Image (cartoon, rainbow, N blue to C red):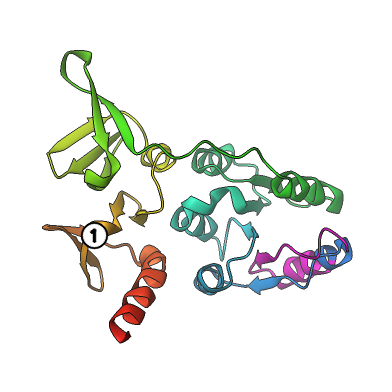
Amino acid sequence: MNSYQTPSILIIEDNLVDASWLNEVLVIMGFKSPFVAHDIDSAANIIVNQRPHLMICDLFFNGRPDGLTLLNQFSALSKQFIMTTNSYETGHYEQTRAIGVGGHLIKPFHPLTLRSVIDQLLSPSPTPPPTSSHLFIRGAQNKQIRVHLDEILFLYSERNYTFIKTVQGRFTIKRSLNKMQEDLDKRFLRIHNSYIVNVDFLKSISINTVLIDKDIIPLGRAYRKNLTPLLNSNREEKAN
C-alpha cells in the first residue's frame, strides 16, 4: 500500500484554480482525495470534525490575512499547517514562524517542493518527553517558584509578557503566550488572541465570554469552535 494513502489533507484556498491544482497534485502523489475549504469558517469546521493530518492553507483571503487568523485559532495544531502565499513580505513569515507553523511556501512552488515538506511533517518523530505537571516562574529576588498546572485558571498576554492567574494568585513571566502554550497540556485551550484557559475551571460559556471560576474571560469569535468538542461532550454527559 502506498504510504500516502493513509494521511488526510485539508486544502484551504479561496482561489479555485490553485485549489484545483493542489487537489490534482496530491491525488497524483497517492493521497486520498483531500478535503477542500474556500473560507476559514468551513476550514475550522472540517478541522474540528474531520481532524485532517495536514492543512495546506493560503495566507490571504480576499486581501485579508484570514489564514493567519485560522492558524492562531488552531495554534495547538500549528505543526500540521503548511502556509502558502505569493507575498514576499518577511513579516508574514516571521509571524507564522513564531506560531510554529510546519511549513511556509511561496507561490508558485514545484510539486516536489510541496512533497518534500509533506514528507518531513509526516515522518516519524522521536517520542516527546512527558508534559511536566508544573511550570517554574522566576519571582522576587530571582527565586524560582513552582506553579502546578492544575492550579492555573488562565493565562493572558500583554505586549511581551504573559500573566498567569492561579488559585493562589497572579504571576508574571516575560514570554509570549504561544511559547507558554507549548508547556501546557490538553486541559488548556486558546479562546482568544490574548487568553488561554484551563477547561477544568470552566463554569459557563456565553456568546462572547466564558466564566473561569469567578473571572469573566473574553471569547474570540474565531476561537469559539475550539470549545465545540467540549460542548458536545458536556451535552452527551447530561444526556446520559
Which image quarter holds the N terminus?
bottom right
The single residue placed furthest to the bottom in the displayed view is 239
Mark 1: few/some/many CA within 10 Å (<14, 14-19, 20+): some
Decide whether residue 12 is among the magenta residues. Answer: yes
Please state which amino acid type lies under the numbered disc 1.
Pro
Picture layout, residue 233 above or below residue 146:
below
Picture layout, residue 139 above or below residue 124:
above
Evaluate whether residue 76 shows in this view: yes
Residue 179 left/right relative to 211: right
Secondary structure state at the residue bearing disc 1: strand
Q: Position of residue 190 (x, y in %)?
A: 37, 54
Residue 183 left/right relative to 205: right
Q: Give 93 or 131, whichever is nearer the viewer.
A: 131
Q: Give 69 or 75, whichever is nearer the viewer.
A: 75
The stretch in magenta equals 1-24
Which image quarter holds the C terminus?
bottom left
Q: Position of residue 137 (x, y in %)?
A: 27, 27
Q: Residue at x 80, y 45 (%)?
A: 116
Q: Position of residue 101 (x, y in %)?
A: 58, 45
Residue 50 position by quadrant: bottom right
